[in-house]
Image: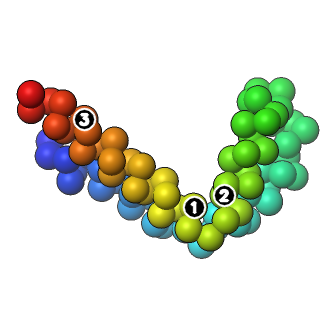
């Protein structure tokens, strides 16, 4: 598979969910007492605050693209 194909699906999903990132962050805050039984409380808080920010989807998409390119370059060597 090429890098475009491996990276396209996660980025497509992120773009599809873009309108809901703030609502998702609010849901994380609401369910925090329940979720902290499974996930670290401080990490959950950091991620929820990050998801509230406008542009957080772009940051995640850029990180996925950067990791995909790094992996593709490492595979060529």
Q: Earlier in the sequence, mark 3 or mark 1?
A: 1
Tell me if mark 1 has few (under 14), some (14-19) or many (20+) residues whose alpha carbon lies within 10 angstroms of its own.
Answer: some
Asked if the residue at tag 1 contacts the one at tag 2, i.e. Cβ–Cβ closer than 8 Å, the answer is: yes
Mark 2–mark 1 distance (CA, rounded to whole Å): 6 Å
Q: Quadrant of the N terminus?
A: top left
Q: Is residue 39 visible?
A: yes
Q: Position of residue 70 (x, y in %)?
A: 26, 39
**Which residue is under mark 1?**
56
Q: Which mark is residue 45?
A: none
Q: Is residue 69 found left or right of 39 in the rendered image? A: left
Tell me if mark 3 has few (under 14), some (14-19) or many (20+) residues whose alpha carbon lies within 10 angstroms of its own.
Answer: few
Q: Position of residue 52 (x, y in %)?
A: 71, 63
Q: Secondary structure at mark 2?
A: helix
Q: Which mark is residue 71?
A: 3
Tell me if mark 2 has few (under 14), some (14-19) or many (20+) residues whose alpha carbon lies within 10 angstroms of its own.
Answer: many
Q: Secondary structure at mark 1?
A: helix
Q: Earlier in the sequence, mark 2 or mark 3?
A: 2
User: Compared with residue 42, is residue 56 higher up or lower down, i.e. above or below?
Assistant: below
Q: Is residue 10 found left or right of 77 in the rendered image? A: right
User: Compared with residue 72, is residue 23 higher up or lower down, i.e. above or below?
Assistant: below
Q: Which mark is residue 51?
A: 2
Q: Position of residue 24 (x, y in %)?
A: 70, 59
Asked if the residue at tag 1 contacts the one at tag 3, i.e. Cβ–Cβ closer than 8 Å, the answer is: no
Q: Residue at x 67, y 65 (%)?
A: 53
Q: Secondary structure at mark 3?
A: helix
């Amino acid at each position: 598979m090429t890098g475009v194909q491996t990276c396209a699906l996660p980025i497509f999903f992120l773009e599809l969910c873009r309108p809901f990132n703030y609502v998702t962050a609010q849901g994380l805050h609401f369910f925090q007492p329940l979720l902290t039984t499974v996930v670290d409380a401080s990490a959950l808080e950091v991620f929820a605050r990050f998801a509230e920010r406008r542009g957080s989807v772009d940051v995640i998409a850029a990180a996925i693209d950067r990791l995909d390119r790094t992996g593709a370059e490492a595979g060529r060597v």
